[in-house]
Image: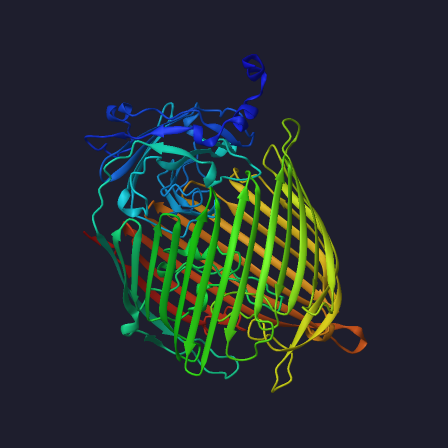
Amino acid sequence: MSAMLLCLPVRTLASLEPAESRVAHARRAMIPPVIDGSLEPLWYQADPVTGFIQYEPREGDSPTYTTTVYILYDTEALYLGFSCEDAWPDSISRRVRKRDDVGRADRVYINLDTFRDRRNGYYFGVTAAGVQADGTISNENDFDGTWDAVWSSEVSVHDSGWVAEMKIPFQILRHGGAMPEGWGLNLTRYVYRLGEVASWIPLSRQAGPQVSRFGRLTGLKDIAFQMYAEVLPHAVARWDARGYDAEDNTEAGPWHSVNDWDNLGFDLKWVPDPKFVVDLTVLPDFAQVDVDREVINLSDYPVFLTEKRPFFLEGKQIFDSSPVQVLYTRRIADPDLGARVTTQQGRFRGAALTARNHDEEGDPQLVGASRLIYNLGRNSMLGYTFTHLNEEGYQATVNSSDGRIRWGRENSLTWSVSAVDRDGPKHQPINAQSTVNIGYERWDLSYNWGFRGRDADMNDLGWTNYTDQTWHWANVHYNLYPRSGMFELWRFRLSGYQESMTDLSHPFGNGQLSMNWRFRNYWGGSAGATQGSHWRRVYADGEEGEVGQYRDNFGTYDPVHYESNNYWLELYSDARQPLEGVLTASRGSHRDGERVASSQSLLYKPSGMLEWNAWHNWNRVWDVSDVNDGFTTDYHIVGLSLRWHPHLNITLRSTIQYTFSDDWYEQAGGRYTAALSERLLSNLMLAWNYRPKSWFYLVYDDRREEVLLDPDRPGDRTLRAKWTWFFVVP
């Protein structure tokens, strides 16, 4: 038998090894190591952690270079020392970027499952340039980088590779203490120029980096905890200048101050126990400093926006673990007070928040949401979510229960049932859906069924596209990872979709065939085709009789059927090179007409501190009855951004986005002329991380509508200075 095992390839041995058989032992340090990027002799008292295994590009193979990790701890913190061998240290990618922007650099990570629940955790990483990355893990392999914490790291490059040291205070972690079975652990190293990822725990490229596959970190004892509070006050100073108004033919207005007591506020986090957190906010800091990328949205539905605001990030992964978006916190757009608690006790995990919000008219609203999760078995769960909105003359409530059962490495069954109780109609106020996923060798199969009643509107605090629908879809994926030849991977997908109204009227469906590929030189692409039909809900304003969007998914509508087809192609170049690009093209139907689209983007990285990004998006529609009377209409977005990072804690960025459309109208003799509408957005930003988790921003915005570049006709201009100061009260 042993002789047979010796004949097996490395990747087979890795797949046979149970993840939990890998155990790393943390050694207690009498004197804490100095975090300076140099492994002093103290580190070698710890047991070395080795045996990393490739995850990319050759699953199961030994990595090109050896990685050794030393783990120490004391009552206050966990310490890690990474020794990363490299025969070509001058080729180590050391790009300087802002925090969490680490995708184009050599880097190392530690993943921790601090409750050993095999579902959730934290990750901490640092690049060879010293850029930190951190975030949370939920639902086994959902990584979210919006969470930031205060921890220490230092790096250095030497003749035989590079070194990274980390100090992770136990205080910043929600954890179950020094559990006898230990914490879940994984360690990862990225060698950027080789496109190589090596992990301490053997991982499946098909299943991803699952928390349930983590090994164990043992040896932690007598972890001290002291109740503490984090305070994050902020101040925003703002000055506006009104631009030239083309419609009223009025001149630009002067600069004026836009400052009052609403520009001051603070967040308070109180941690009485590592399993329990209380957050409070007064006039929370929602000042936007990062410019949003413009998009061409030709649908009837709004664009989903990612939550980035600090108050809503603690416990966000608890709400996000629901299969449906019962809580979409961007609905709470203008709060002045808020409170939240999060906790994990044994198999229970929960979060609750409340806030006083103001709607678009400034009227006050009281909003609340809570979610409770019970962990079943190894990595299954049950969940319950409740949301409530109350304002004068109106109330809305959603109750939602859900669950997930997992078995094997890639198999799962999820379901949810939600009931909506809001003022107004209550016909079929139920939303229900379920999904089953099956993985077998190179195959992935999934099937989803759903029902959303006519009045199952969760959009007071949640997110749904539209109601009065029932649907089915099925996907079959085939993943191929050739061990030789010019291709590094192939993925094929065949899917089908069927939908109708809840009374089974107005059915439609489509089928899709697509594929992804990547060459060994890291060029690659995707292509696919969709054929079928769909029906669009044409909404009418009850008073005006005008067709248009409605309150996200309600209104008086008539279903209109269309043929539906779409063909697309995407090509991308090697992201490891100084110049990288992406090209996409598509052709298909749009409502009762046609559409063609393309996009191009180039990213130029002349040095480790500087990068240029240029992009162009174009859509053309024609013969669409409710767009420009069926005539040809072009939509364009052209953008250019510059990022310069002269220091790890300083970022300078400029962004220009030019959006315009050409509307073509028929004239006598069959000729056409263009009517141009345009918008120019400019943003300049200086960001200085002057101390841990404390920032100073200086931001200038210029917005010009329907006006070409004319110095005598400036746009609407805003200058903001934003300051935050983070400190801890022991």
Which residue corresponds to the image point at 62% horizontal and 63% vertical from the top-left? Answer: 451
User: Is residue 38 left or right of 465 when viewed as pictured?
Assistant: left
Residue 582 x, y percent position in the rendering: 59, 47
Picture coordinates of residue 147, whole percent (x, y): 38, 51
Please tell me which residue lies in front, 255 or 312: 312
Number of marks in picture: 0
Asked whether residue 418 is in view, the answer is yes
Q: Residue furthest right?
A: 669
Q: Which residue is situated farthest in the top direction here?
A: 3
Compared to residue 427, the image places residue 219 above or below, namely: above
Q: Is residue 250 above or below residue 61?
A: below
Quarter that holds the N terminus:
top right
- The spot of residue 62 in percent (x, y) is 50, 24
In the depicted view, which residue is nearer to us: 179 or 99? 179
Q: Quadrant of residue 176?
A: top left
Answer with the quarter of the image where residue 4 lies. Answer: top right
> Looking at this rendering, what residue extends furthest in the front direction?
377
Q: State the colouring used for the structure image.
A: rainbow
Residue at coordinates 57% horizontally, 21% vertically from top-left?
A: 9
Note whether 667 is above or below 573 in the view shown. below
Is residue 127 at all visible to an observer of this figure? no
Residue, far bottom: 543
- x, y (%) of residue 150? 29, 47
Q: Seen in the image, is 513 located left or right of residue 200?
A: right
